[in-house]
Amino acid sequence: VEAFADEYQGRPTPAMGRFSGKREWETLYDGWDIADAIKDLNFVRSDGKTLIPQPHLRFEADQQWTLDDVRGNTLGSPLNALRAMSPDDREKHLAEYRAGFTITPFN
């Protein structure tokens, strides 16, 4: 939870984020719609709408993903979420995380 903070174990970390220009992307884009973050990162083609990376190998124009296809999903920073929790809530969350999960096939 202390990672990438302005302070580490009581000592200030004034250079944190200065070498790359921005702190870690998930804190920078915390609360943003994923479409807006993709556009801010310049991952959009010259038409201003089609994503540069595509989740498939189909090249037909009508099958290309656009910002509209990903809009509506909000990015959240796990570090911000953990920092906002009370110590008890954080321990409960971490215990659930450590317990793992089961992947259930859907076919």
Image (tube, rainbow, N blue to C red):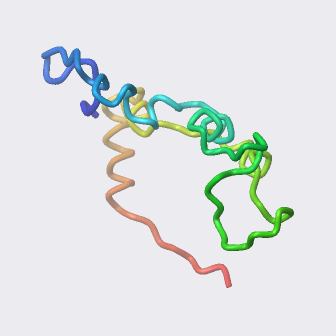
Does residue 2 appear left or right of residue 11 in this picture? right
Give me the residue at 67% from left, 44% from top.
44
Labels in figure, total? 0
User: Toward which corner of the image does residue 40 lie, by quadrant?
Assistant: top right
User: Toward which corner of the image does residue 17 lie, by quadrant?
Assistant: top left
The percent position of residue 78, horizontal first and vertical second, equals 43, 40
Depth check: 101 or 27 in front?
A: 27
Give me the residue at 18% from left, 14% from top.
12
- The extreme front residue here reads 46
User: Toward which corner of the image does residue 6 lie, by quadrant?
Assistant: top left
Depth check: 87 or 34 in front?
A: 34
Q: Quadrant of the C terminus?
A: bottom right
Q: Please, is residue 65 above or below residue 19 in the view?
A: below
Q: Please, is residue 54 above or below residue 9 in the view?
A: below
Q: Please, is residue 13 above or below residue 4 in the view?
A: above
Depth check: 71 or 53 in front?
A: 53
- The extreme bottom residue here reads 107
The percent position of residue 103, horizontal first and vertical second, equals 51, 73
The percent position of residue 61, horizontal first and vertical second, equals 83, 62
Give me the residue at 22% from left, 15% from top.
14
Does residue 81 appear left or right of residue 48 in this picture? left
Q: Quadrant of the N terminus?
A: top left
Give me the residue at 13% from left, 16% from top.
11
